[in-house]
Image (cartoon, rainbow, N blue to C red):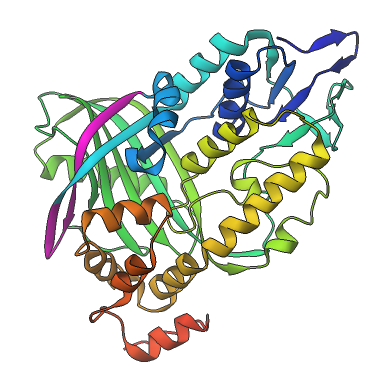
């Protein structure tokens, strides 16, 4: 059901500010479970979801969640490959990808007039949103999902990437994804190529770095993708689209301060701190939040704020182990040898690796990850655990 428009004023039961992944999933799940609700999605861009690809392991979410997410999924595979200089491994389990174009199509088909694109929001309150054109929208519940709020209350580094969906002259020979190919010069942190084969001749290839900075030098990364394709024997004949981004990797921070910016306004996605603290991926948390909100009988900002904020703090407490691992990765070794720590990680049993990406490690998993002889210098390890940056001296 669409929100009601009356001149310069609208009202709705729930306003979702920002048409990114989290708010789109919340809106479509609510529409499916509670079609009587008057929903309104406000997006600054001309299309929902921006220009993004979201991927996830089947074990990241429940079978029932995977079922309702199915219409959004562009492609699925069984198994994937991991390639390091001294370790190559095939891992089981399903892997899935969503394109922003498909997300937009599916949401518009379900919500139609309940979505406004090309609108600029100038103020967000717990019960009202003001647009740049002077219109006001009132609702008992507002959810702000406009991405990273941009404050510095969380100590973050980045998983950043530049990717291209390309067409090849001949089949690539891949039957399943290569999620990490780290057999290349290590630049700007732990670096790898990521390849998803949608058809025999249509691929997404991304140059990805676990870096200390969010900045992207797109030109050399584009050249590196072409060079990688050439080394693999893939001749690129066309580029369908390009995308880029920087996902947060959390080392530490003040979550109380992170939530202090807009008291009483519920949040979603990265703006709510709901993402995997090591990978930066937000899809599994977005799916779980959409499922839970669809079961809420009373949608009111105060209650939703308390619910989502409490969820964020539970994830933070649960994620302290990931913060520790991130400090070891970023502070415990020079950038050009960080790949060795990931290579070491992939010695683990496949079910432990699955639970790592799902954010549901057991005590035994945590012990397995740090036991043995990790490839990290002891003084650096101590500093990293204490969150003391290590300064490399020139040789």
Q: Position of residue 156 (x, y in %)?
A: 55, 63
Residue 75 colored in magenta in the image: yes
Q: Against 192, is 119 above or below?
A: above
Whether residue 7 is visible to the viewer of this picture, yes or no, is: yes
Whether residue 19 is visible to the viewer of this picture, yes or no, is: no
Q: Quadrant of residue 62?
A: top left
Is the magenta region chiefly helix, strand or loop?
strand
Left/right of residue 57 with respect to residue 360 in the rendered view: left
Q: Quadrant of the N terminus?
A: top right
Left/right of residue 189 with respect to residue 85 in the rendered view: right
Residue 332 colored in magenta in the image: no
Q: Residue at x 57, y 23 (%)?
A: 29
Q: Residue at x 64, y 40 (%)?
A: 268
Q: Position of residue 131 (x, y in %)?
A: 83, 26
Left/right of residue 277 with respect to residue 6 in the rendered view: left
Q: Quadrant of the C terminus?
A: bottom left
Q: Residue at x 79, y 57 (%)?
A: 260
């Amino acid at each position: 059901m669409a929100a009601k428009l009356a001149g310069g004023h609208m009202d709705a039961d729930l306003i979702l500010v920002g048409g990114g992944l989290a708010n789109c999933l919340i809106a479509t799940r609510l529409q499916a479970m509670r079609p009587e609700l008057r929903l309104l999605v406000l997006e600054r861009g001309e299309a929902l979801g921006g220009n993004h690809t979201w991927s996830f392991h089947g074990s990241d979410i429940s079978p029932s969640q995977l079922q309702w997410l199915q219409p959004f999924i562009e492609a699925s595979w069984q198994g994937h490959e991991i390639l390091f200089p001294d370790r190559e491994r095939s891992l089981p389990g399903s892997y899935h990808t969503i394109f922003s174009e498909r997300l937009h199509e599916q949401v518009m088909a379900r919500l139609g007039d309940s979505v406004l694109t090309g609108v600029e929001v100038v103020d967000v309150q717990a019960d009202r949103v003001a647009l740049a054109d002077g219109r006001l929208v009132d609702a008992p519940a507002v959810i702000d999902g406009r991405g990273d709020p941009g404050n510095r209350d969380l100590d973050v580094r980045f998983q950043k990437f530049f990717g291209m969906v390309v067409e090849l002259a001949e089949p690539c020979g891949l039957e399943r994804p290569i999620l990490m190919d780290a057999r290349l010069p290590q630049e700007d942190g732990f670096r790898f190529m990521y390849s998803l084969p949608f058809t025999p001749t249509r691929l997404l290839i991304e140059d990805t770095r676990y870096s200390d900075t969010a900045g992207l030098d797109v030109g050399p990364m584009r050249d590196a993708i072409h060079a990688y394709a050439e080394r693999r024997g893939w001749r690129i004949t066309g580029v369908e689209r390009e995308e880029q981004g920087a996902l947060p990797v959390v080392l530490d921070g003040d979550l109380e301060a992170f939530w202090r910016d807009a008291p009483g306004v519920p949040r979603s996605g990265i703006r709510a701190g709901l993402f995997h603290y090591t990978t930066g991926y937000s899809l599994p948390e977005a799916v779980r939040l959409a499922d839970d909100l669809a079961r809420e009988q009373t949608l009111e900002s105060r209650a939703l704020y308390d619910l989502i904020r409490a969820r964020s703090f539970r994830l933070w407490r649960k994620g302290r182990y990931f913060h520790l691992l991130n400090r070891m990765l970023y502070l415990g070794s020079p950038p050009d040898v960080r790949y060795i720590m990931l290579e070491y990680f992939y010695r683990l049993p496949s079910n432990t690796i699955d639970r790592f990406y799902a954010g549901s490690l057991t005590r035994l998993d945590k012990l397995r990850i740090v036991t043995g002889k990790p490839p990290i210098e002891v003084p650096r390890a101590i500093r990293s655990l204490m969150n003391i940056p290590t300064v490399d001296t020139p040789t």
